[in-house]
Amino acid sequence: MNELYVGSEVGRLREVIVHRPGTELLRLTPETKEELLFDDLMWVRRAQEEHDQFSEALESTGTEVLHLDVLLRETLAVTEARNFILDLTFDERLHGPAAAPVLRQVASQLDGAALAELVIGGLTKRELLELTDEPRSIVLHSMGPDDLVVAPLPNHLFARDASCWVYDGVAVNSMQKPARMREAVTYEAVYRWHPRFASAPFQRWADGLSDAQATVEGGDVLVLGNGAVLIGMSERTTPQGVERIARRLFAAGSADRVVALDLPKARSFMHLDTVMTMVDERSFIEYAGLGELPSYTITPRSGTGGTPVEVELNIADHAPGHAHRAIADALGLHGLRILTAEQDLHSAAREQWDDGCNALAVSPGVVITYDRTPTSNAFLRESGIEVIEVPGGELGRGRGGPRCMSCPTLRDPL
Ligand SMILES: NC(=[NH2+])NCCC[C@H](N)C(=O)O
């Protein structure tokens, strides 16, 4: 079995987790899409075809593609994993004390495939009543037949966010938005009990189930290489989250520098990787409208160490405009190459919205992007970057591109 290690942002990609859109996306309606963090409804069959092409593009570069629903199904063969998932899916605070135990009991009878489908795709009252007689519960009685008893997880499509591998460990993330919180439960179960992960040695940077204010989402975390990590403080990732993950990384000796970038808090910039991604050892795509942002460099204070709580942080703050310098220093470079396509502001804003900045590097200088951002793609090619385009007409409606849709578990260092 391969060792689990993500040594950089752009080194040769070897293994990645993705999630092909399914039933969960059929639950989106004009009324629910906003709460579920989508800007439009998806034509799901077409989105699946697009996603298949994304997986094929990854495989054609020699990357092993793991599918989250398959991992979850296999994980559910383990009794402890099954109990963990059932305990955290059916909750009396959500379903009420009358219904919660009945729901749990009904779900516990399902085989792995059906339970994985329920966890990710959700369950309506109508579907529940195909499995059991209606239990006496005010919560269930007051629901309409097509109301969701178990909420779907449509943002599992964006496999980047709920967990992220950083060097020799993984953070299962505390998610900022209620619609995404249960995604952490899926990853927690997979990493704890799936045979592929359960027997492998790796560190844990966060367990995703307890951090409340200290949220971090993987779209904000760039594994720069050279022991450095770049983290965006965004709509989703808080300074508390950054400090906590830095302390853990330092305590394990897995990283020795975190650069934190203070982003505007806005939906269109929800994660760092929507405005900035790394494409080779020294080049970054950057959105024209990003502006000059404050940043911080965090290092461990010398002489401290041991357990994470004992590690003291050394924090240097940089004036706006010095972030590139701080990143170059972290990488041990004289400077960065910043790639910002020349285009008018309307076009730049449209292409950023359509994930033109969200490139997934498969090796240094080779990236996967959507086809719907032609100006950004042409500019990357002119800059000597090899661009593999995949269709994103439907997939892009949830505001995430190729980098967002991938969770690397194995990637070479620089
Ligand atoms: N890494 C990313 N940029 N992920 C994009 C996530 C999009 C998702 N609909 C959300 O709002 O949470």
Image (cartoon, rainbow, N blue to C red):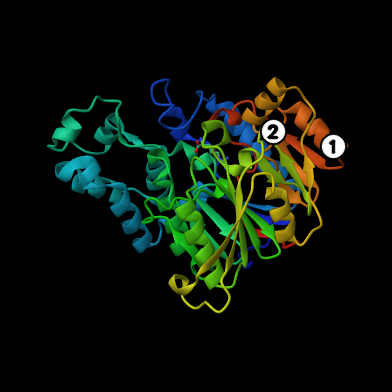
Q: In this view, does 291 lie to the left or right of 181?
A: right
- In the image, farthest residue toward the front: 319
Q: Mark number for residue 381?
A: 1
Residue 134 in the image, given as x and y percentages of width and height? 17, 35
Identify which residue, 404 or 73, lies in the foreground. Answer: 404
Residue 15 in the image, given as x and y percentages of width and height? 65, 56
Q: In this view, does 85 lie to the left or right of 97?
A: right
Judging from the image, what secondary structure is the residue with disc 2 in? loop
Q: Is mark 2 within 8 Å of ligand 1?
A: no
- CA separation, marks 1 and 2? 13 Å
Check the picture and name the quadrant holding the N terminus: bottom right
Is residue 200 at least partly visible in the picture?
A: no
Residue type of the residue flagged with mark 2:
Gly
Residue type of the residue flagged with mark 1:
Arg
Residue position marked by numbered label 2 in the rendering: 356
Check the picture and name the quadrant holding the C terminus: bottom right
